[in-house]
Image (tube, helix red, strand yellow):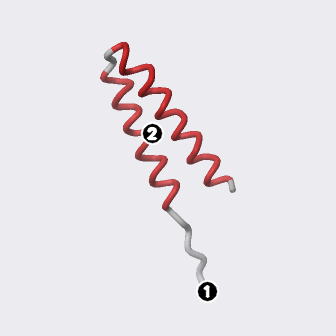
Amino acid sequence: MKRITVALLFLLAAIACYVFGVPVGGAFFLALGVVFEGIFWVKLFNRKRKSA
């Protein structure tokens, strides 16, 4: 549950950066949004495997 919560927080941070960066024309916030979105996808699909 914690993994999904953290992933959703990164998604919200990415959306916030996109919303702020597009009207202002801030390339920094757009790039930061891309980074946060990438972290979101990695966290969402990265599952730790338990050793047998």
**Residue shown at the point (33%, 18%) measured from the top left:** 26
**Amino acid found under the numbered disc labelled 1:** Ala
Say whether residue 35 is left or right of residue 50. left
The residue lying furthest to the right in this view is: 1
Position of residue 9 measured from the top left corner of the image (x, y, whole percent) = 59, 40
Residue that extends furthest to the bottom in the rendered view of this protein: 52
Number of the front mark, 1 or 2: 2
In primary-sequence order, the first of circles 1 and 2 is 2
- Return the residue at label 2: 36
Seen as rendered, the residue at the extreme top is 24
Q: Quadrant of the N terminus?
A: bottom right
In which image quadrant can residue 30 be found? Answer: top left
* Residue density around tag 2, few if under 14, some if 14–19, many if 20 or more, within 10 Å: many
Give the residue type that dot 2 points to: Phe
* Residue drawn at 47 percent across, 34 percent down: 14
Decide: is 3 above or below 31. Answer: below
Q: Is residue 22 left or right of residue 49?
A: left
Q: Quadrant for residue 49, please give it.
A: bottom right
Q: Secondary structure at mark 1?
A: loop
Q: Which residue is mark 1?
A: 52
- In which quadrant of the rendered image does the C terminus lie? bottom right
